[in-house]
Image (cartoon, helix red, strand yellow):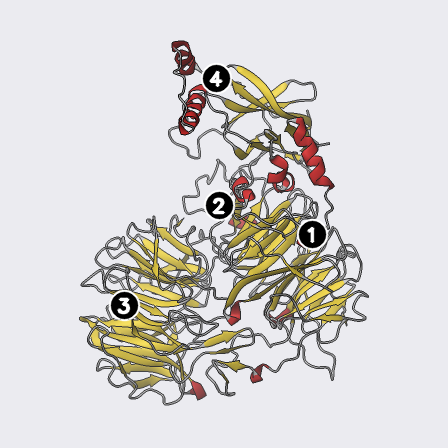
Amino acid sequence: MTRLARTPARAVAALALALALPAGTPAAERPAAPKEHPSEKLFAGLALREIGPALASGRISEIAVDPRDPYRWVVGVSSGGVWTTDNAGTTWTPVFDGEGSFSIGAVTLDPQNPLTVWVGSGENNSQRSVAYGDGVYKSIDGGKSWKNVGLKSSEHIGRILVDPRDSDVVWVAAQGPLWSAGGDRGLYKSTDGGATWKAVLAISEHTGVSDIAFHPGDPDTVYATAYQRRRHVWTLINGGPESSIWKTTDGGATWRKVERGLPKVELGRIGLAVAPGEPDWVYAVVEAAEGEGGFFRSTDRGESWEKRSSYVPGGPQYYNEITVDPRRPERIYSMDVFLMVSEDAGASFHELGESNKHVDNHAIWIDPERSEHLLVGCDGGIYESFDRGRSWTWKANLPTVQFYKVAVDDRKPFYHVYGGTQDNFTLGGPSRTLWQHGILNRDWSVVLSGDGFQAAVEPGNPDVVYAQAQYGILVRVDLATREETFLQPMAEPGDEPLRWNWDSPLLVSPHSPTRLYFAAQRIFRSDDRGDSWRPVSPDLTRRIDRNQLAVMGRVQRADAVAKSSSTSLYGNVTALAESPRVDGLLWAGTDDGLVQVSEDGGASWRRIDRFPGVPERAYVREIVASAHDADRVYAAFEDHKSGDFRPFVLVSEDRGRSWQGITRGLPERGSIYALAEDPVDPQLLFAGSEFGLHASQDGGASWFRLTGGLPTIQVRDLVIQPEAGDLVVGTFGRGIWILDDLTPLRHARPDRLAGAGALLLPVRPVDGFVPAMPLGYRDKGFQGDAFYAAANPPFGALFSVWLEEEILPARKARQKRESELEKAGKAAPYPTADQLRAEAAEEKPALVLRVADPSGAVVRRLPLEPKAGLQRVAWDLRWPPADPASLEPPKIVNAYTPLPTGPLAAPGRYTVTLARRQGGVETDLAGPVTFEVVPLAARALPARS
């Protein structure tokens, strides 16, 4: 039995009072949140652990290679920040983790000084899964530090160019907001290195600039493509009358539209490139209405255009970027599903060749010295070819997977995590391994191909996994045999066709492990693992005709450019929940702003269509039915595809009859995508937002940011593994992270800690085993530096301690007293010689964790810094080594460096006590706390003493 250990006694009374507060206290009665939440500082040291995977990677927006150092690359990950390598991808460093955006549209190196890096935040595509940015960033030290230099409301930046003659002259093609009008939209120019910007080409509130190119011999001649587009939940319009090509010959002072030879219909996205070997040649790949698009060339600096072919990429909103071989002006590469190339100036295109390579290409770099050497960025990461696409090397160490949803199982000895990803399958892998090396790519596997979404695992039977691909393709996978069974419900003859969301909600009932719920515009139930289905609801949506909704100020024609491309049919269920406390108490949320509740298993439904402070048709992103109170339910709405980035989180204490907003402390800019309620503490909530992870310890009355090493990133899903007590965090662009052991968040709260002095938290049961080394030696063995390994949690027993005030040595304590007296206008007594000698001879104070076996014998003493706040330290389940201790750390750590040794502690019950050591005296502060070391299950042979 574990217990909370703390001092002094008055704190015990405070804790008892806090625990006595009713869990269901209405939000209106809860205390107001302070301006600076004390929990944010308290838990600043609570680290999250990245588990990858790098079995797949994520979408790449841009690759910039240092012209003076071909091994130095700067890579813009579409929704994973900026990464650099100095060794051609052998190792990577994320250099943008603490900035205001994670979505990247453009990366450019100053041609005169490649250590000056320009980044345009906000991906430059118009797909359903793009995120937005907050302007232009500049680094003058190769990415070590950054400054936001403006255009903060551009949201999406297509390209940045730096004048090769003058590093202070910078051009930015700002596509502008995708989901709303206005913003910083158009072509901007700075002549002072980004200190100020001038809009040199502004089209309208709906139209920005997507692509720009210099004339190679005359940078005052600039070509720019105007791009009119708008996306909402229900549609995409990827063009309009304002999409066009423009030209200036005087550095942007004046502009002309150049359209002779281009289609006369409405145009969409236009990709542009100039041939370095033929500087008067300009290429354009043009999306257009009515099938009039194609590939065009101008041989007179854009004055007139010739249609070379009808080739357009398959989905220009996602592609339409072209690059000319610097050594062969008639060779053009086009970013497309398959990487396309023309050898005849665009008269024909063919696939370059992508054997054993991921598709959906977005960026290419061509070696200016050797055209056979290519770097390509695609939805699967970064590939390198030395033979122009006949063979490829993949960089299998870039953990930038975009997860839509995550799920966990109850596998022993360690639970597994599953997740559906953008264009990189449904993946499954362990939360930790038996290996000393960590979690390797080989520990992960593909569960189902295609884009992946909500997965689920049968409780008690972790070999039964449900996985999804786009638009409701549902498959049951038997992991023991890898047999796949197709499960998607179908409409009955005569029924209305089913409208599946791109990311359809799936739920395993908490009341029966074989019962599933799955939803299109109506909900289906299966009681036999999906072998048969029956509807348990009517159409739960508003049934709005999306073709009658205004876009860019008017109802668009049926033949508008790319109308509704890559968009789910409007009117479907997007969130599902069943109360863990009441069988058949069902909740559903829709993409058009409704919440529906059934209290009889779906026989009847009650529609809820008004929510305080929430836009009428806001997307219902998440519903969480409380595990502690059947009447309580949480809902998260978001409306970013209408240009509204505010968070909307609500709670109802009466089954949806009334609602209250609970967003205090959440950033004003940042939609909420995920919610989770702790199954142990009803007041502990988590929220995943556009830019990070947040927690509340008071039922949502106030929120604070949980950083813990997590970069600025979109958190798309959250799930708590109940037995381990871990929070699993699915991000859209930086893989999966785990907050191991929620004990500190369950027990350490600012209101409970006041006057406590010190705190030693309960310790969860510990798996006892010896980590294996299947690679032969420690860490990465002989696999090389490019070998990817994610961290296991600290091995052994994980102790969490809190100290109210730093324990200072006598000298610092005296100096602190003197400073306080001086501030109060009082004279400080001068120390005596004996005091000064004692200070000089004083042993440095420390915190000590003392681990003892059942007999009371001390097994291990673990030192900690005596600093204030929360700390975690692990005991490796070993007694001290018998070898003489070395006071010097190893000069080199490699595969041969010995790991810590010492006799392994036997399974059984242990205690840990927190003590202060000062002046040669050790004083207990908290504890003892009892915990148990348990032999690892599933041994082939019984353990022997």
Which numbered mark, 2 or 3, is in the foreground of this view?
3
Left or right: 449 as drawn, with respect to 226: right
- On screen, residue 497 versus residue 426, left or right, reads right
| Amino acid type shown at disc 3 | Lys
Q: Are marks 1 and 2 in contact (CB under 8 Å)?
A: no
Q: Give the amino acid type for the residue marked by disc 4 in the picture.
A: Pro
- How many C-alpha atoms fall within 10 Å of the one at disc 3: few (<14), some, or many (≥20)? many
Q: CA distance from mark 4 to mark 3?
A: 66 Å
Seen as rendered, the residue at the extreme bottom is: 264
| In this view, the mark in front (3 or 1) | 3
* Disc 2 from disc 3: Cα separation: 36 Å
Q: Is residue 283 above or below residue 361?
A: below
**Relative side of 320 to 517, left or right:** left
Tell which circle, 2 or 3, labels the residue nearer the N-terminal end: 3
Asked which secondary structure carries label 1, the reply is loop
Q: Which element type, helix, strand or loop, lies under badge 3?
A: strand
- In the figure, residue 251 lies in which quadrant? bottom left
Instruction: Tally the numbered discs.
Output: 4
Nearer-the-camera pick, 675 or 613: 613
Q: Secondary structure at mark 2?
A: loop
Residue under pointer 1: 462
Please tell me whether mark 4 sits on a helix, a strand or a loop.
Answer: loop
Disc 4 or 2, which lies upstream in sequence?
2
Residue linked to disc 4: 884
| Residue at numbered disc 2 | 709
Farthest residue to the top: give it. Answer: 834
- Mark 4 vs mark 2: give the one in front: 2
* Mark 2: amino acid: Gly
Q: Earlier in the sequence, mark 1 or mark 4?
A: 1
Horizontal arrangement in the rendering, residue 611 relative to residue 114 (left or right):
right
Q: Report the disc number at residue 189.
A: 3
